[in-house]
Image: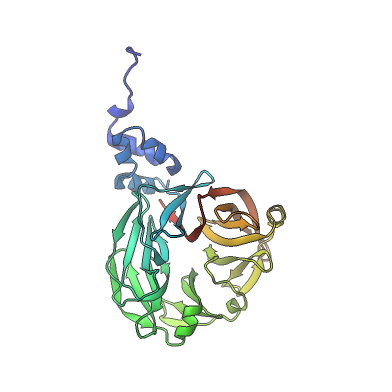
Amino acid sequence: MKNEPPSLVPSLPDYIVLDILARVPRCYYPTLSLVSKHFRSLVVSPELYSRRSLLSCNENCLYVLVNSEGIPSDRLYTLHHKALVHISSLSDIPICESHVAVGSRIYMFGDYSGDVSSIAFSIDCRSHTLQRLPNIPTPLELTVAGVIDGKIYVVGQCRTKSTVMMVFDTETHMWEEPGLIKPDISSEEWEISCTVVVMAEKIYIRCGHDSFVYVPKESKWETDEMLDSKDWDGGSQCVVDDVLYYYDDHEECLRAYDPKQKCWGVVKGLEGLLAEMGRLYWSKTACFGRELALYFRQTGEEPSKMWCAEISLEKRQGGEIWGTIEWCDQVIDAAGPFDFRVFVSVMV
């Protein structure tokens, strides 16, 4: 109407608008960016995320890198209102071997083609932009990575087939040299399977049927025979509050390993989910803040469909861990087969 008063929002100073937007859940930012070009610039501005941090409004957001058959690049999705939403503004993401999250960034290392490589990238999950990082000083293949105190430990094999660990400082964006060499791991074992998790400021490397533990503060290697008693590798594992979780397809249960107690257990309270959904196929776990996301397909379903269950965890007296299903729903139904390659929880 002609007599309608103009909106007050455009007349507000930016610092007030930023203060308001910082308190709004991030899942609404895509909608807010449609208000105007000015809002679109504000919701991706560093000032907004600095304000969110000061107000303790940061949120854990789950990101997933997905690869479709025949496409030579990854696509980025985020969990939004119980559905995976494609980040269409970021395309042609290089297919890398190892990924970790530090703050609001996803760091990626190595070339998935299988040859030694020095490439390194990061994705800024605030602006959804890709950045090239300084090359790995020693080109590596079959890399895995873990992070402690802002330093990323990238482990892989160099051209001589020695297992080398390189350290990248996310504050200075510099590589620390020389690389550490772990002589006890054969190239044959490394090529079978290699996985890294971080618990209680220790780096746990699963290689073949054995685990190797590196303690950065003491620059020493350890072993953990109890951890070796289960087949927790294969990319299906995650760590929540320094406890390792993975879904055991054979026994159809969610297992948990406490490195302080050095014991395995089974997460209780999930019997209803397993009874309702039947046998879970192609299951993977992901850390989602202090909760756990269990991704899976149902046996007999099309390979283009994927389900997710968000599980809150509680350690009860006596050390038992119980899980509560917060929600469970189908989160994606793609046009064709796809591979959920990487799950990372990012603070934004």
What's the residue at 51%, 53% (across, down)?
336
- Left of 295 or right of it: where is 138? left
- Residue 210 percent across, percent down from the top left: 54, 81
- Left of 284 or right of it: where is 144? left
What's the residue at 42%, 84% (across, down)?
182
- Residue 23 in sight here: no
Task: Report the front residue among 99 and 43.
Answer: 99
- Residue 239 in sight here: yes
Look at the picture and state if 15 lies above or below 155. above
Task: Report the front residue among 27 and 226.
Answer: 27
What's the residue at 37%, 52% (across, down)?
125
Look at the picture and state if 194 lies above or below 52. below
- Residue 93 percent across, percent down from the top left: 36, 58
Look at the picture and state if 272 lies above or below 136. above
What's the residue at 58%, 78% (across, down)?
228
Image-quadrant location for residue 174 = bottom left
- Residue 280 percent across, percent down from the top left: 64, 59
- Residue 41 percent across, percent down from the top left: 29, 40
Q: Quadrant of the N terminus?
A: top left
Task: Report the front residue among 297 and 262.
Answer: 297
Image-quadrant location for residue 169 = bottom left
